[in-house]
Every structure is written in C-alpha cells, then in structure tokens.
Amino acid sequence: MFRHAKQTARGLTLSFCSAFLVSVFATGASADEWLSVHNWPVPPSDHRTTIAISQNPDGFVAGFYRDVDRRVSIYFALPEESPERLISAGLVVVYRGDEGRGSDIKLPDTLNPRETGFTDGRTVTGSIWHGDGPTAYAGTFRDILNSQTLCARFVTFTGQQNACWDLSDLHSAVEDALQITATVSREDQAWHELRAAVAISGMNRCTPANHLSCTPIFDHCFARFEQQKDVAMFNDCMAVVE
C-alpha cells in the first residue's frame, strides 16, 4: 500500500493558508485508515523507523515519524501514479488540521537548518515537533492531534494539488509509532500552555547582562509557580530582577 519512492516566499504564507482553508476544508474528507508501519525507511537516509501513516482515497499519503534525532517529522506523498512533481525550493506545502493555525514546509529553510525538510519531487518531509516529553501539549502537532481532519496544499511545477485525510483513527497509530500519549484533556493542555507562556515571559527578563543573578531567581520563582499555579505570584517574584 505504501511504497517508499527514493526519489513563493514565506511572506505569502498567511494569505495562502486563508485561501487554502476556505477551498480545501469545503471538500471534506472521507474515513481514512491510519496504520503504524514498522521498519519504514526515512528519506533520504533510509534510517529505519516506525511511521503512523494513511493513504486517502485519492492516493495522497500523510504520516508522522521519529527521525534519528528523535524529532518528529510530518511526511506527505503525492499519488504514485501522479505525473505531478513538487517544486524543489520555496513553499512546497501548506498544511493544517481543523483545529489551530496552519504550518508549512519551505525548502531550503536556511534560518532553521535542523528543521530543514526534504523533497524528492514526489514526497516531502519537515519537522513538526521536537519530540521530548510524553506528548505535544502545544503547537502544530497538538493542533493536528486535536483535529478531525488534516488538509494539505502541495505546490507542483504545474500548479497546486489539494488533499485531506480523516483523523478518526490517528491516535492509536501515533501512540504506537511515536510512543507518546496522543489524547490529553483540555485542562492538562491548558496548564502546559500556560506553563510554557510563563516560562518564556520569565526567561525574557534574564538578559546576557543579568543572567548570573537572574537565572537563580527565575528557577526559584518558576518552581513556586509550578506548585501554586499563580501567575500574579510569579510576576511579583520576578519583579526583583533588574
């Protein structure tokens, strides 16, 4: 079913996403089976891993897998019989679930070399989650895990190709392939999002000029915040930083 083939500017991304959502989500998506496939060769290295993968009725493939550095990547492939070929540079694909914001894979991503994706013309991959922890509590991957539908728009040499996948069976395949918990409660997710936001706001107060004195204060204040879950207390605690 899944035969591995060895083979626009970012400023337009937001408007591109908006038009994409109106046109693609209107088409809907049929029920698609998600499978956990072992010993799958990661392009282009052929490192073997396990992928949560699905092929929709039109032959488009989507998947999620861990690379050698444990980061989680998203994988897309055009139908095997398609004569279309993906562009090799620039905005190759825009994708999103019906929850949250859209994302994209732009090649080459010189600003984030660790997150640079890969395309061979028929398939394309890109980093979607750092892979640490029991699950993704926020970000694009969490948005997809919370969604019922995943849609993508591919940019080819002759135009654009649209595809959607039903995500009803995604969680069990992702849990097996990535060894994470795919489902989280809204309360748990909200707490981890707040925790991340508070951590960022606190760390932003620690500059190169004051980091020796600021870092111990941040560690102390953040530990108290994790116990009390009180943002005002954290801000008061950090107020001593100059």
Image (cartoon, helix red, strand yellow):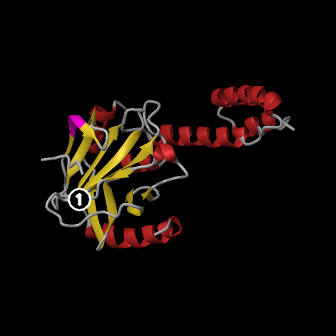
Apparent side of residue 152 relative to residue 236 in the rendered image (left or right): left
Kindly identify which residue carries mark 1.
78
Q: Is residue 39 magenta?
A: yes
Q: Residue at x 47, y 32 (%)?
A: 132
Q: Position of residue 209 (x, y in %)?
A: 83, 37
| Residue 61 x %, y % | 23, 53
In x, y percent, where is residue 64? Answer: 32, 43
Is residue 173 at all visible to an observer of this figure? Answer: no
- Identified at 69% across, 36% down, the residue is 230
Query: As displayed, is residue 95 above or below residue 167?
Result: below
| Residue 130 appearing in the image | yes
User: Which is more toward the observer, 144 or 185?
Assistant: 144
Drawn side of residue 139 relative to residue 177, left or right: right
Residue at x-position 44% and y-position 70%: 16
Q: Tell me the magenta residue range.
A: 36-40
Q: Which of the two residues, 22 or 39, is positioned nearer the viewer here?
A: 39
> What secondary structure is the magenta-colored segment mainly?
strand
